[in-house]
Image (tube, grey):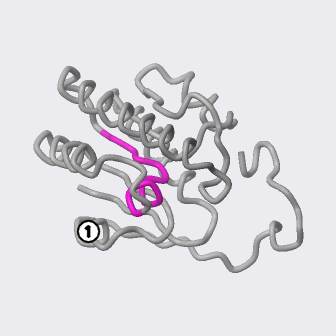
């Protein structure tokens, strides 16, 4: 089954982490891949403590897409494709995989910051092996809407950022 967590509200990654912990509790392997993210976050420090959750992400933070140079965008695309290849390799070798999370993949896919063919291979591998797949991010491509069995839209009503309050450790990261 495919889960899509989207919308402009807070909670997409948090929902994906909750499902990851639930699946890990069954003894299944969880592959948690983040796209366009490289900064350290508290939730990922916790996920790394759980033996059957495997985290894949960029080796460094290059900031938001609108801040990146063309060279940064080429580099992020390279990293994303390495992540997709690593996921495929893991799925191929590990029969006990229960969940694959592609956090913020909607932005990377829609912006062309990954190889769509590799992404399609990950989708196919999950489907063929009965692995739950979670996709997160705003404004997903139409194909993601169509393939999803679950769609949850997080809607922002109010957020401290609108008042100029920056992200807080332990709450937003």
Give the residue number, with chain letter if any, for mark 1: 143
Residue situated in front as seen by the camera: 73 or 100: 73
The residues colored magenta run 99-110
Instruction: Specify few, some or many for label 1: CA neighbours under 10 Å numbering under 14, 14-19, or 20 or more.
Output: few
If the image is split into quadrants, where does the N terminus sit?
bottom left
Query: Please, which residue is most extreme toward the front here?
Result: 70
Q: Closest to the observer: 105 or 42?
A: 105
Give the quadrant of residue 94. top left
Residue found at the far bottom of this picture: 157
Q: Which image quarter: residue 22? A: top left
Q: Residue at the spot x=40%, y=23% of the render?
A: 52
Query: Which residue occupies 55% across, 25% down?
Result: 48
Left or right of 124? Residue 29 is: right
> Residue 50: x, y in percent?
51, 24
Residue that appears at 69% across and 36% down? 42
Where residue 106 appears, as percent x and y from the top left, is: 42, 60
Mark 1: secondary structure: helix
Q: What's the residue at 39%, 45% (across, down)?
A: 101
Q: Is residue 105 magenta?
A: yes
Residue 90 locus on image (x, y percent)? 27, 25
Task: Tell whether position 26 is magenta.
Answer: no
Q: Which quarter shows the C terminus?
A: top right
In this rendering, position of residue 154 left or right of residue 134: right
44 sits left or right of 115 in the view: right
Quadrant of the rendered image containing residue 49: top right
User: Looking at the image, is 144 positioned above or below residue 30?
Assistant: below
């Amino acid at each position: 089954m495919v889960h899509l967590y989207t919308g402009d509200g807070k909670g997409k990654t948090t929902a994906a982490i909750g499902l990851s912990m639930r699946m890990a509790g069954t003894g299944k392997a969880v592959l948690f891949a983040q796209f366009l993210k490289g900064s350290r976050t508290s939730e990922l420090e916790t996920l790394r403590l759980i033996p059957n959750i495997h985290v894949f992400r960029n080796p460094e933070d290059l900031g938001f897409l609108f801040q990146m140079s063309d060279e940064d965008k080429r580099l992020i695309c390279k990293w994303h494709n390495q992540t997709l290849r690593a996921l495929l390799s893991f799925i191929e070798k590990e029969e006990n995989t229960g969940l694959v999370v592609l956090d913020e993949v909607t932005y990377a896919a829609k912006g062309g910051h990954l190889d769509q063919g590799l992404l399609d291979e990950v989708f196919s591998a999950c489907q063929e092996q009965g692995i739950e797949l979670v996709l997160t991010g705003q404004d997903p491509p139409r194909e993601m809407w169509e393939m999803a069995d679950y769609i949850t839209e997080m809607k922002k009503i109010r957020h401290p950022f609108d008042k100029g309050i920056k992200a807080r450790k332990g709450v937003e990261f």
